[in-house]
Amino acid sequence: MCDARRMANSDSGESVTERIVRVLETFTPTRTVQTAAEIGRRTGLPPSTAHRIVGDLIEAGLLERDDDRRVRIGLRLWELATRSSHALRLRQLAMPAMERVQARIREHTQLAILEQDEALFLERLSGPDSGSNVTRIAGRLPVHASSSGLVLLAFADRDLQERILAGKLARVAPETITDAGVLRRKLAEVRRLGHAVAPGYIESVATGVAVPVRDETGTVTAALSVVLPREAAVDPALVELHRAAREIERALGFRG
């Protein structure tokens, strides 16, 4: 077969786009530079295919080589990703309020959205005395285990909630909720209270506290959170988070 379909798909039926995504997904917040051979091994693609795709992406500016011939994400990919980006606009509008929360609470302050059934963190502000925290910018956490995830899941579509509840709830820390019935009750609590408190769900030494952020339609579009030492009182953080969330919502156009 010599038609466009043959050119667009591998022998396994995988499209060029799917293979490109596999290459790009080998980069993580902790793995920002790789060799072409490492990329090939991590994708599971044939070496010649992986090297060809990496070369094409470098030629297009979506990947770059450094002086040691290692590969990293290119500036053009960053440029394209940020054009007209809802996430970028949200982050920009949230930053002033986040900075005030971090200055007053003096602990990690985070902004997350729901993406592919996980909490994706758009920003994290930290100070020199902030406590333990595993979150990274552009990093992800399970929705059932993080305070931000619990907020996003509690106000998400029912279909998504049921899919998460029906799946395996991985244990991230000893106190992570892994029982569907317990998680269902926790989500109801989050909706009733308007915030989530997650003591020891990610790390035993920390408590996550999160509140919803609504867009102009009233839909919960993000979660604003702080990570406190386990023994810290949560009420002062909740006051600051709710105040900041209202400020961000006004900037987004919510008038509720």
Image (cartoon, rainbow, N blue to C red):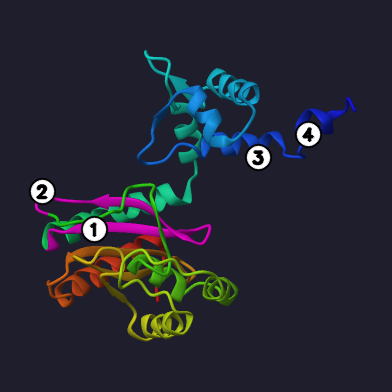
Could you say where residue 205 lies in the image, as x and y percent from the top left?
18, 65
According to the picture, the residue beneath numbered tag 3 turns out to be 18
In the picture provided, is 130 more to the left or to the right than 193?
left
- Report the disc number at residue 11: 4
Q: Residues within 10 Å of mark 4 (few under 14, many from 20)?
A: few
In the rendered image of this protein, does residue 242 appear above or below residue 8? below
- Report the mark closest to the observer, 2 or 3: 3
- Report the mark closest to the observer, 2 or 4: 4
SS class, disc 1:
strand
Of 209 and 166, which appears nearest the observer?
Answer: 166
Does the rendering let one see residue 202? yes
According to the picture, the residue beneath numbered tag 1 turns out to be 109
In the rendered image of this protein, does residue 27 appear above or below residue 231? above
Could you say where residue 135 lies in the image, as x and y percent from the top left?
30, 53
Could you say where residue 165 lies in the image, as x and y percent from the top left?
52, 75
Quadrant where the image shows the C terminus: bottom left
- Whether residues under marks 1 and 3 lie with C-beta atoms below 8 angstroms apart, the answer is no
- Report the mark closest to the observer, 2 or 1: 2
Start and end of the magenta stretch?
A: 105-129
Question: Is the magenta region chiefly helix, strand or loop?
Answer: strand
N-terminal of the pair, mark 2 or mark 1, is 1
Distance Cα–Cα, label 4 vs label 3: 13 Å
According to the picture, the residue beneath numbered tag 2 turns out to be 128
- Report the mark closest to the observer, 4 or 3: 4
Residue drawn at the location 52% of the way across and 35% of the way down: 42
Distance Cα–Cα, label 2 vs label 3: 41 Å
Residue drawn at the location 19% of the way across and 51% of the way down: 126
